Amino acid sequence: MEEVTLRAIQRAMPGNGRARVHNSLLSAIGIEDKTEVEVVTPDGASLTLTVFADSLVEQGQIRISQDDLKKLGITDGIDVKVRRKIPVSEQVKDAAEELAGKISKGAKEIGDTLSEKTIGIREGTTQAAQEIQGKAREVSAKIAEEVAPLGEKIGEAGRETAARIKDLVPTARFNAQVEAGLKQLSPDNASQLKKMLLETEGDKHVATAKTATSTGRSIQNLTIPPDVSVIAIQRADNTLVIPKSDTILGSGDRVYLAGSDRGLEYMTKILEG
């Protein structure tokens, strides 16, 4: 099981049950984007969260909501262990393989015992039958232990999936500025940008880079509030760019943002003056 140690940093935006890490950490943990992980504190408390990849999060951090930090019983800045949450199907499969190995080993031991004994066949046969019965009882007990709670786990997984789908369903159209920018993109780029906007928390806004304090500067050199995310950049030729920390803004670039009203107002002043 892949596991990394990250520093838990409180997110400015709410989002219980979700966490954000740098894109490069997905392979280190052995997961894909929007996959469940188990977060474990130094005291042994654990919580299952869904991880979202975010290139703007520092590589050694995992950003967690205030409510989830409270559930874990830790404060901002504590190191935690992050590892992949093993699906129920894998747990059952691993348990079955383990049981199969035990049965195979038991059968081999029984065969070796019978081949070595030429005297006392009756006693050997009785012993073999007892061992088989014992293995059968172990198998039955293990299956009962693993399968009995399976229905409850599947039901919980269904409820979580329904909740995630509900989160992704838009409750309203984007504002006029965002809609206008989307119409100038190719259908594929427009579809990709809509998906990213819907998956990002907060109000959506677009501002045009005009000021000397924004054009010609990289994303990492802008003063971006912690409650604002830079989603994408639409160049003057209407090509779509997924921003990285070293992406340079050009004059006339449309910058798609998500966050709080106050944070978006601040970023609009930085970009447009």
Image (spheres, grey):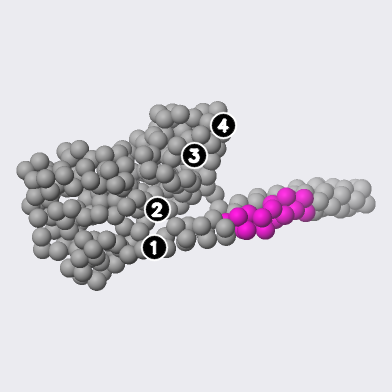
Q: Are marks 1 and 4 in contact (CB under 8 Å)?
A: no
- Closer to viewer: mark 1 or mark 4: 1
- Closer to viewer: mark 3 or mark 2: 3
Q: Earlier in the sequence, mark 2 or mark 4?
A: 2
Q: Residues within 10 Å of mark 3 (few under 14, many from 20)?
A: many
Q: Position of residue 151 (x, y in %)?
A: 67, 58
Q: Earlier in the sequence, mark 1 or mark 4?
A: 4
Quadrant of image for the C terminus: top left
Residue at 21% from the left image edge and 55% from the top image edge? 206
Which element type, helix, strand or loop, lies under badge 2?
A: loop
**Which residue in the structure is indicated by mark 4?**
44
- What span is colored magenta in the figure? 140-157
Res. 26 visible in picture: yes
Q: Residues within 10 Å of mark 1 (few under 14, many from 20)?
A: few
In screen coordinates, is 272 left or right of 263? left
Q: Are marks 2 and 4 in contact (CB under 8 Å)?
A: no
Q: CA distance from mark 4 to mark 3?
A: 15 Å
Dominant SS of magenta comes to helix
Amino acid under disc 2? Asp
Magenta stretch holds residue 180: no
Amino acid under disc 1? Pro
**Which residue in the structure is indicated by mark 1?**
170
Which element type, helix, strand or loop, lies under badge 3?
A: helix
Magenta stretch holds residue 151: yes
Q: CA distance from mark 1 to mark 2?
A: 20 Å
Q: Position of residue 98 (x, y in %)?
A: 65, 50
Q: Are marks 1 and 2 in contact (CB under 8 Å)?
A: no
In screen coordinates, is 112 left or right of 78? right
Q: Earlier in the sequence, mark 4 or mark 3?
A: 4
**Which residue in the structure is indicated by mark 2?**
33
